[in-house]
């Protein structure tokens, strides 16, 4: 059973090795803290799950806004690293080779080549206009709004799904 944590009784800091540590007042400590979103797409800043280095759940923070600014910044950095999600802004080409698909794209982080498994296994429809792609190395990429792509990119994408 999950326990909701009171942000007033929680202290989180960064250890010398860069990992996070948590101290719950009057309760326990946790080292090598893992920070996860219970609902990473629909409620990204709510229901933040904290786990110790062994994977055991410590509890859930209802809302990042309840934290002081320093603690919130630490957790936001940890979440940004865990949920790194480049956005595809242009699709230069998609071609299939040996059962895989190779995508030449531009992202908000620069141009890249994405290799995915068969297209139907790599594309996840979040909404009618929003899509996630997962490459063969388990990296994720987002098309936040297929209608916002230029006409050629949109045509290339819609022609493959």
Image: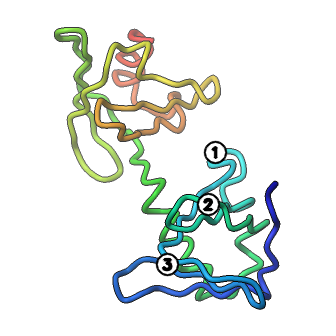
Q: Is residue 27 toward the left or the right of residue 32 in the image? A: right
The tag earlier along the polypeptide, 3 or 1, is 3
Element type where label 1 sits in the image: loop
How far across and down, in percent of the image, does residue 54 sit? 51, 62
Element type where label 2 sits in the image: loop
How far across and down, in percent of the image, does residue 97 sit? 17, 11
Q: Which mark is residue 20?
A: 3
Q: Which residue is mark 1?
A: 41
Residue located at (77% from left, 81% from top) = 7
Task: Find out whether the residues at labels 1 and 2 contact each other: C-beta distance under 8 Å.
Answer: no
Q: Is residue 43 toward the left or the right of residue 138 in the image? A: right
Nearer the camera: disc 1 or disc 2: 2
How far across and down, in percent of the image, does residue 49 sit? 67, 61
Residue located at (31% from left, 53% from top) = 109
> Is the residue 3 above or below the residue 11 in the image?
above
Q: Which residue is mark 2?
A: 56
Q: Which quadrant of the rendered structure holds the C terminus?
A: top left
The tag earlier along the polypeptide, 2 or 3, is 3
């Amino acid at each position: 059973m999950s326990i909701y944590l009171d942000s007033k009784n929680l202290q989180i800091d960064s250890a010398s090795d860069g990992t996070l540590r948590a101290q719950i007042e009057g309760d326990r400590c946790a080292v090598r803290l893992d920070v996860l979103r219970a609902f990473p797409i629909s409620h990204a800043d709510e229901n933040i799950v904290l786990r110790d280095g062994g994977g055991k759940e410590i509890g859930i923070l209802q809302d990042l806004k309840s934290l002081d600014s320093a603690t919130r910044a630490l957790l936001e950095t940890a979440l940004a690293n865990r949920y790194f999600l480049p956005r595809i802004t242009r699709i230069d080409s998609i071609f299939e080779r040996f059962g895989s698909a190779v995508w030449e794209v531009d992202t908000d982080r620069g141009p890249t080549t994405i290799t995915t498994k068969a297209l139907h296994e790599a594309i996840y429809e979040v909404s009618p206009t929003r899509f996630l792609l997962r490459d063969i190395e388990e990296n994720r990429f987002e098309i936040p709004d297929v209608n916002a792509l230029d006409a050629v990119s949109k045509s290339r994408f819609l022609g493959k799904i």
